[in-house]
């Protein structure tokens, strides 16, 4: 892969495209064009996605409004082509996370599908293509695509902690109060929050929030 200014050509392509495509929109925050992945390019891709979804007051976070608009697109499955620019955003986000986004920008191909399946597998989720009601890229996974969480072991991480992270994601990812967490092998506050939410679900608490409060204490007693 071509390297530009100590960066990655595909990441540079993402940065140039998102700035050129959305730079004139109010509220858009340009990303540096240096070929280096990170939160700046992810935030710009989030803003671009919000513009494509028709959100007027754009903000560089993937919140409930963005999730609802993504859900309104319907099932995003292999070959989805309802909006070529959203396909580009998906592909560029994959490249920025270290996966192969596809061979042609804006056209969903088998490489795009394979990378999303790999991403989901690394998260500990089902592959998203097996079964009659499978959705490859639901809002919960789209949100993870546009962040900087790692889903493979990083320096300082362990396979044992990663197995716990993947187990939590696989068991609770579709629950409303649960956020898919990183699978980087690092025991962090994110893992602790996930464990707390999972425990609250298992104890039948109506509105899990990840806090060890009186309701959880009473259920444990």
Image: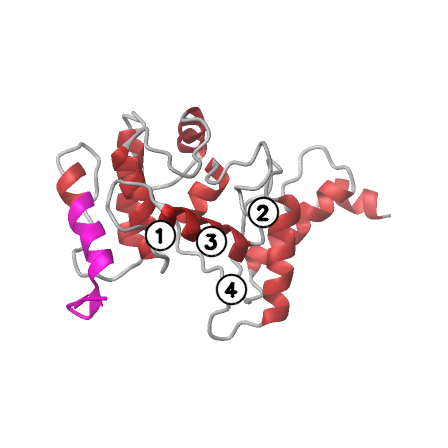
The region drawn magenta spans 1-18
Residue extending furthest toward the bottom:
156
The disc at residue 151 is: none
Marks 1/3 in contact by CB < 8 Å: the verdict is yes
Residue of label 2? 126
Q: Residue at 51%, 36% (x, y): give it.
A: 135
CA gap between label 1 and label 2 equals 18 Å
Q: Earlier in the sequence, mark 1 or mark 2?
A: 1
Residue 45 image position (x, y, % from top left): 28, 44
Marks 1 and 4, the one that precedes in the sequence: 1
The residue indicated by pointer 4 is 184
Where is residue 117? Give x, y as percent: 48, 50
Pick whichever, 160 or 77, lies toward us: 77
- The mark closer to the camera, 2 or 4, is 2
User: In the picture provided, is 117 more to the left or to the right than 175?
Assistant: left
Q: Quadrant of residue 29?
A: top left
Q: CA distance from mark 1 to mark 3?
A: 9 Å
Tell me the CA gap for discs 2 and 4.
Answer: 18 Å
Mark toward the viewer: 1 or 4:
1
Residue 119, label in figure: 3
Identify the mark at residue 94; answer none if there is no mark. Answer: 1
State which tag comes first along the sequence, 3 or 2: 3
Answer few, some or many: residues within 10 Å of disc 1's Cα (few below 14, many 20 plus, some between 14 and 19): many
Q: Residue at x 31, y 47 (%)?
A: 91
As helix, strand or loop, the secondary structure at mark 3 comes to helix
Disc 2 crowd, CA 10 A, few/some/many (<14, 14-19, 20+): some
**Is disc 1 in contact with disc 4, using a CB cutoff of under 8 Å?**
no
């Amino acid at each position: 892969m071509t390297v530009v200014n100590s960066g990655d050509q595909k990441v540079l392509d993402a940065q140039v495209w998102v700035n050129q495509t959305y730079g004139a929109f109010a509220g858009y925050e340009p990303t540096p064009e240096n070929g280096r992945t990170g939160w700046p390019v992810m935030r710009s891709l989030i803003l671009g996605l919000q513009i494509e979804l028709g959100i007027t007051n754009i903000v560089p976070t993937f919140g409930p409004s963005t999730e609802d608009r993504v859900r309104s697109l319907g099932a995003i499955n292999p070959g989805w082509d309802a909006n070529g620019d959203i396909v580009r955003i998906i592909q560029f986000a994959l490249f920025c996370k270290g996966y192969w986004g596809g061979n042609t920008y804006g056209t969903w191909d088998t490489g795009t599908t394979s990378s999303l399946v790999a991403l989901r597998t690394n998260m500990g989720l089902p592959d998203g293509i097996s079964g009659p009601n499978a959705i490859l890229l639901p809002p919960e996974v789209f949100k993870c695509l546009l962040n900087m969480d790692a889903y493979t072991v990083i320096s300082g991480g362990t396979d044992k902690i990663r197995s716990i992270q993947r187990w939590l994601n696989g068991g609770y990812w579709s629950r409303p109060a649960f956020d898919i967490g990183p699978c980087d092998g690092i025991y962090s506050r994110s893992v602790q929050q996930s464990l707390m939410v999972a425990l609250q679900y298992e104890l039948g608490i109506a509105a899990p929030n990840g806090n060890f409060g009186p309701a959880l204490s009473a259920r444990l007693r």
